[in-house]
Image (cartoon, rainbow, N blue to C red):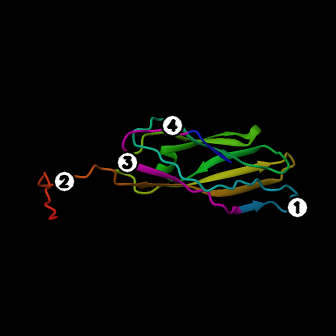
Amino acid sequence: LVSAAMESVSHRRIAVLFVQLACLLLGASVKPGASNSAPDMYLCSNLNTSYVTLSGVSLIQFEARDPENDNVAMTLVGKDQSIYFFSVVSYPNNRTAVLKQNSRLDADSLNKISLVLQIKLNDGNLNEITKDFDLVIVRDINDNPPEFQNLPYRWLIPE
């Protein structure tokens, strides 16, 4: 389940935030003897943000479903610029998290950012389950207005 909490931006977009959550569950690791089930999160979604989006804006909310209704904590795993531009605020009691933009995007210095949303579930009996989901790829798009040379254009159409 995803509820888009993104503010609509009517200005030109410089970067596209492509949220790609795998519809498959990736990399689940369960400790031996654990009878705890891993949480599910099925989603494929696109989300646009802009270089003018302010810091601290909530972009999207994630919800994990756990069969045993255990608390689920979500964290963002990434390198270098990944964590600088984005963060996740996790609410373990209701198994949700919100992806926030920490800083304005700079399309001149970014061509791609990959992030992983890591979900950790603990049933209180030391049975910890961890799953990783591929989350964000930021790509630059060309949104510059077209430039026309030698204006005005004129055509004659014989009839």
Contact between labelled residues 3 and 2, with CB atoms less than 8 Å apart: no
Question: Which is closer to the viewer, label 1 or label 2?
Answer: 2
Residue 33 disc label: 1
Residue on which the image places disc 3: 14
Pick the front one: 146 or 131: 146
> Nearer the observer, disc 1 or disc 4?
4
Q: Residue at position x 45%, y 39% from top?
A: 103
The amino acid at mark 3 is Ile
Mark 1 surroundings within 10 Å by alpha-carbon count, few (fewer than 14), some (14 through 19), many (20 or more): few
Q: Quadrant of the C terminus?
A: bottom left
Q: Earlier in the sequence, mark 2 or mark 3?
A: 3
Identified at 88% across, 61% down, the residue is 33
Identify which residue, 131 or 145, lies in the foreground: 145
* Amino acid bearing label 1: Gly
Q: What is the secondary structure assignment of the residue under circle 3? A: loop
Q: Is residue 20 magenta?
A: yes
Distance between mark 1 and mark 4 Cα atoms: 45 Å
Q: Mark 2 highlights which residue? A: 148
Q: Look at the image and give the residue range highlighted in magenta.
A: 6-27
Distance between the Cα atoms at labels 4 and 2?
33 Å
N-term mark: 1 or 3: 3
